Image: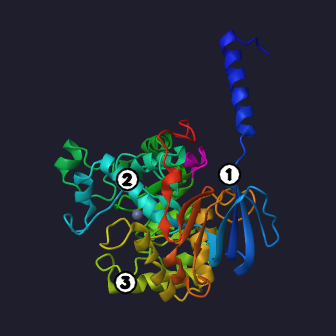
Amino acid sequence: MTKLSGSRSWLIAMLVASAILTADAQAPLTAIRAGRLIDPEAGRVLTNQVILVEGTKIRDVGSNVAIPAGASTIDLSQLTVLPGLVDAHNHLALTYKQEPESNVYYLTYVMDSTALRAIQAVSNGIQMLASGFTIVRDMGNNGNYADTALRQAIEQGWVPGPTIINSGLIIGGMGGQFFPSPEMAKNHNIVYPEYLDADTPDEIVKAVRQNILFGAKVIKICVDCKPYGYTSDEIKLVIREAAKAGLKVEGHVQTQNGLRNAIDAGIWSIAHDTAMTDEFHKLMAQKGIWRAGTETPITLTGHTSPDRYKHSVEMLKSAYENKVNLTFSTDADYYVPGKTRGEVCLEFLRTWKDAGIPPVDILRAMTIGGYRVSQTETVRGPIKPGYFADLIAVPGNPLENIDALKNVQFVMKDGQVFKKDGVMTPAAFFHGGPVNGWRIR
Ligand SMILES: [Zn+2]
């Protein structure tokens, strides 16, 4: 062992002292009395449960959990408590609108700076949390890494919001999802940063590394946005490079060729139901590939059509019958006047109901499926001892009527109350500094 210099031994003494101080500080205890508690995995409702929360985590759950002296209590005896919901595909730093851009995000990208979009993302995140979404996978189209900024702001402790699993820039063949003019693409680099061009193996490796460096927690690729989409081997290269950092890969897929390549490569998740068929669902089920179908409901006028909606409903039904790994995913990245971002996302329940999927399995997709596709299932999601205390409560029983989820009255995130009696109470989440640590990148 080398001898410590004076300044280093001083530093270590300080670190030990602060560790002792931290250990001495008692984490606050909160006992939640739940009239009903849903376990989505078992598909059952337990009555008169106590959930004991210590600091940010759940310490105990059960019908005869003793409430320690000094614990504060929260009475949800008239409500149904359930774990937080997951939207497995959104874009919180993108909000296109009828006015002025006719719902075409080319103009949003030109008019809204990354800074403005990051602030929109904070607001959209708060709106999602208020509707019970405690985890959001944010899958690109976020300007110059506004999604990373959002995740850091929430994790460091500046603002409330869901747990964010963000993708950074969408990686794709030249042009991404845009069809720019040669002048705008070559003279003005208009595609970047909405998309990150990667056409050769070297560029693919570098693009994945850039996203990891700038804070991505999942990698998103355009599999087939252009006729020169990725081959199975190229997708495998993305998967291998992402895996070095423990990241999974989601593919935007819109053609049957793209689906074949993505499935063959063994991609983690596939977004959009555009090209899906019964046959492809069978293959996805065999390989355990996650499905983020983003099934826009017919009620969101202008964002789907009767034909597209019919396809979405039929394919969701097919995916369910073929036992594909299902997630609840919306791609709801637009403004619907009169609705919050969270309320827009809950409109998507309509498609799931029209597909004839039982409420318990809709709820499983929104919870267990969401935790697994987000890779949080061992630390965050289920209401079990040792997990982060993320939970919500609604009147009625979502296992009988899934629309009960549209009336979230209570939200707890990381052990802190965010919404109570239907009203947001976010004061405890705002801080004048990075209270959870500036090292969170
Ligand atoms: Zn999307």
Please determine whether, in this image, residue 131 is positioned above or below residue 305. above
| Alpha carbons under labels 2 and 3: distance apart | 26 Å
What residue sits 55% from the left and 80% below the top? 319
Q: Which residue is mark 2?
A: 142
Measured as percent of width and height from the top left, residue 392 is found at 59, 69
Dot 2 or dot 1: first in sequence order is 1
> How crowded is the residue under tag 3: few (<14 C-alpha within 10 Å), some, or many (20+)?
many
Q: Quadrant of residue 258?
A: bottom left
Q: Could you say whether the residue bearing mark 2 is in a helix, strand or loop? A: loop
The image quadrant in which ligand 1 is located:
bottom left
Relative to 136, is 378 on the left or the right?
right
Amino acid residing under circle 2: Asn
Quadrant into which the N terminus falls: top right
Q: Could you say whether the residue bearing mark 1 is in a helix, strand or loop? A: loop
What residue sits 65% from the left and 70% below the top? 75
Amino acid residing under circle 3: Ile
